[in-house]
Amino acid sequence: SAVISQKPSRDICQRGTSLTIQCQVDSQVTMMFWYRQQPGQSLTLIATANQGSEATYESGFVIDKFPISRPNLTFSTLTVSNMSPEDSSIYLCSVAGRMNTEAFFGQGTRLTVV
Amino acid sequence: DAKTTQPTSMDCAEGRAANLPCNHSTISGNEYVYWYRQIHSQGPQYIIHGLKNNETNEMASLIITEDRKSSTLILPHATLRDTAVYYCIVRVAHVSAAGNKLTFGGGTRVLVKP
């Protein structure tokens, strides 16, 4: 299994500011996935982060709002830009297991925008 | 990926078997059935997956109907710690990490009662 560490675990931010969430994996992985979970809702995929190329965003999510970095095979960041209260959610990082048979998730970053 | 339909919620008694149904009538021949669960304030956790044969591991059993249009996750002896949201997900064969880009439905909120 993969061990995923996310930082920060939670934060309260002022509207209009930006927050960068870090995701560190204990092994090299080709793809990392970023999800959002709005209050009381299921998970929604934001984007797929590949090392050495631009992230691929899902419908409804854009790079200007959620820029992603993937500098190496064990690390990625997701920035939530120009935040509004509607961005209050849990943001989760995920990676595929060694045999690509299952996904592993971090504990998530609980973001509250005030 | 094919869509899945699950009951919104269900209760079960501690120590008894919990049977969680899932319908996936549009599943394709190369799609697997996966189950994840999300305990409150944690990231989703992989439980089990299967293609067409029944599967069992240390956490649960997965029963897939012969026509593969539905499946049942069985927690053999539910404990209070099994209280969680359970997600049934259909995804393509795991030939690449991209297959771990998951589409989450609403899931079943399971409450295990003493």
Image (cartoon, rainbow, N blue to C red):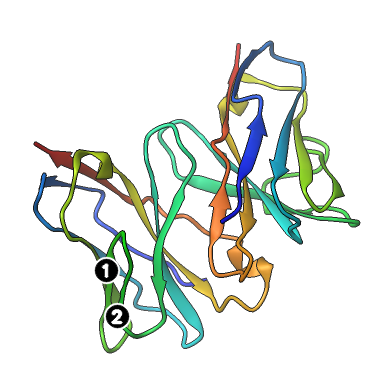
Label 1 and label 2: CA atoms lie apart by 7 Å
Quick check: marks 1 and 2 in contact, CB under 8 Å? yes
Residue shown at the point (66%, 24%) measured from the top left? A8
Q: Characterize the local packing of mark 2: few (<14), some (14-19) or many (20 or more) Cα atoms within 10 angstroms.
A: some
> Residue B61: which numbered mark, if any?
1
Give the left or right position of residue A88, taking residue B112 as reference: right
- Quadrant in the rendering for residue B109: top left
Residue A95: percent from left, percent from top: 64, 54
Residue shown at the point (56%, 53%) measured from the top left? A104
Residue A22: percent from left, percent from top: 73, 34
Q: Circle 1 — which element?
A: strand
| Relative vertical location of residue B13 with respect to residue A20 in this rendering, above or below | below
Label count reads 2
Q: Which residue is mark 2?
A: B54
- Please check whether the numbered discs 1 and 2 fall on a single chain: yes
Give the left or right position of residue B80, taking residue B108 as reference: left
Residue A17: percent from left, percent from top: 77, 16
Q: Circle 2 — which element?
A: loop
Q: Foreground: B80 or B103?
A: B80
Q: Characterize the local packing of mark 1: few (<14), some (14-19) or many (20 or more) Cα atoms within 10 angstroms.
A: many
Q: Foreground: A22 or B110?
A: A22
> What's the residue type where badge 1 is placed?
Ser
| Relative vertical location of residue A33 with respect to residue A89 in this rendering, above or below | below
Mark closer to the chain start, 1 or 2: 2
